[in-house]
Amino acid sequence: MINELSILDDIFNGADVDFPVFSCASFSPDVDVVQTKDAYTISMDLPGMSENDVTIDLHEGILTIASQKTEAKTEEKSEENAPAEQQSCEPVYLLRERRSMQFSRSFKLPRDTNRNEISAAFKNGVLEVKIPRKEAEQPKRIAISVA
């Protein structure tokens, strides 16, 4: 029997059981995975992003959350020698490290998930993906007929 803590241990130890995580990113957002009797919930911190910056895909039991957010390029010109009427009010960056942000995180879903009812919500920079669980299949005894 697998309990909640062993599932989390498996995530962090990279075992190939419930919720192993694959990541490909220029940064990797922080994630919490919570299991209740009714659902799994993935909460992901995405500061500075909106729901329009993120995609969630499900393919063959792999849930992938990804984003590629890039700032529009601005032409930076030296304005110190330009006449006063040509100087703009646009900011001149002295240091710019937040130009783009991309990531892709994939989660192998456990067999007990109801993949047709996955939902997602975005609030205050946190993406929450709820993955309902289906009832565990109970053992069934097969009657033997007499021929």
Image (spheres, helix red, strand yellow):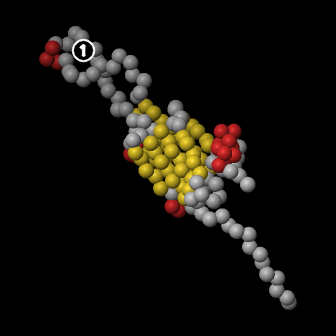
x and y, in percent, of residue 120 in the image: 46, 52
Q: Is residue 114 above or below residue 26?
A: below
Q: Is residue 57 visible?
A: no
Q: Determine the image quadrant of residue 134.
A: bottom right
Q: Determine the image quadrant of residue 91.
A: top left
Q: Secondary structure at mark 1?
A: loop
Q: Is residue 114 above or below residue 147?
A: above
x and y, in percent, of residue 74 in the image: 32, 27
Front residue of this view, candidates 123 and 111? 123
The quadrant in which the N terminus is found is bottom right
x and y, in percent, of residue 99 in the image: 40, 28
Residue, disc 1: 79
Residue at 65 percent of width and 49 percent of height: 4
Q: Determine the image quadrant of residue 131.
A: bottom right
Residue at 82 percent of width and 86 percent of height: 145
Name the kind of residue labelled 1 in the image. Glu
Count how many numbered circles sit on residues in the image. Answer: 1
Front residue of this view, candidates 33 and 107? 33
Residue found at the far left of this picture:
85
Asked if residue 107 lies left or right of residue 73, the reply is right
Asked if residue 93 lies left or right of residue 133, the reply is left
x and y, in percent, of residue 71 in the image: 37, 32
Residue at 40 percent of width and 45 percent of height: 123
Residue at 64 percent of width and 44 percent of height: 8
Disc 1 crowd, CA 10 A, few/some/many (<14, 14-19, 20+): few
Q: Is residue 104 above or below residue 108?
A: above
Q: Is residue 107 above or below residue 70?
A: below
Q: Is residue 12 visible?
A: yes
Asked if residue 60 lies left or right of residue 129, the reply is right
